[in-house]
Every structure is written in C-alpha cells, then in structure tokens.
Amino acid sequence: MAKRGKALIDHERCKGCLLCVRACPIKVLTVDTEPNEGGSYPAKVMYGMKCIACGNCFEVCPDMCIEVYELEEGEA
C-alpha cells in the first residue's frame, strides 16, 4: 500500500513562490485564489487525500512554511 500523507501550509508566511506546487509529483498543491494579509497568493492544498508524504514541497520551500506528516493507516 502506498504511503499517505498530509501537507499543511502556513498561508500567512507563504510568499507565493509556488516552488512547492512545481515540486509535487502528485499535483496535490495549487495557488490560492485569495491573497494572504501580505498580498501574496499563497500555495494551498487542493487534493490532500492524494498526498503521499514525499516531502518534496517541504524540501523546496524557502520560507519553511510547509509541514508534511505521514499518516497511519485509517487516519484522515
């Protein structure tokens, strides 16, 4: 069975570089249509159920505003 994960993005710290969106092999992330308080359009988790906890988004984020968790079987 493939790993399942959960990505969390701090929308206020995200500056909208979207490196994480390009790094995600499963295309879980996308750009938000609402700006944050800084005026940037941050990344957001669009298809969270598809996340495989690879950590690519976390690795490329220059602002360290992404956390990735590997889920246990049965967790949502």
Image (tube, grey):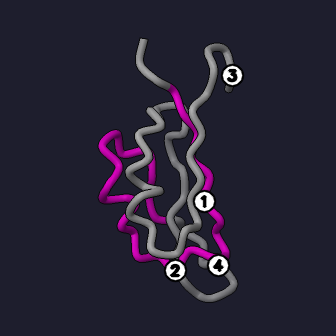
Q: Are marks 3 and 1 in contact (CB under 8 Å)?
A: no
Residues drawn in magenta: 4-31
Q: Earlier in the sequence, mark 3 or mark 1?
A: 1
Tell me the CA gap for discs 4 and 2: 9 Å
> Reading the chain from its start, which is encountered first: label 3 or label 4?
4
SS class of the residue under badge 4?
loop
Is label 2 in a helix, a strand or a loop?
Answer: loop
Q: CA distance from mark 4 to mark 1?
A: 12 Å
Name the residue beneath numbered marker 3. 75
Q: Amino acid at mark 2?
A: Lys
Q: CA distance from mark 2 to mark 1?
A: 11 Å
On the rendered image, what quadrant is the C terminus found in?
A: top right
Q: Earlier in the sequence, mark 4 or mark 1?
A: 1
Tell me: 68 left or right of 59.
Answer: right
| Percent position of residue 4, x then y | 51, 27
Relative to 24, residue 52 above or below: above
CA separation in Å, label 3 and label 4: 29 Å
Q: Amino acid at mark 3?
A: Glu
Q: Is residue 12 left or right of residue 22?
A: right
* Residue denoted by label 4: 36
The image shows residue 31 at horizontal and vertical percentages of 46, 64
In the rendering, at what x and y percent does residue 46 appear? Answer: 51, 48
Q: Which residue corresponds to the image point at 58% horizontal and 39% vertical from the top-left? A: 6
61 or 14, nearer to the observer: 61
| SS for callout 1 | strand
Q: Residue at x 63, y 88 (%)?
A: 38
Q: Which residue is mark 2?
A: 15
Closer to the observer: label 4 or label 2? 2
Q: For the residue marked with disc 4, what is the amino acid?
A: Asn
Q: Which residue is mark 1?
A: 9
Task: Report the mark closest to the observer, 4 or 1.
Answer: 1
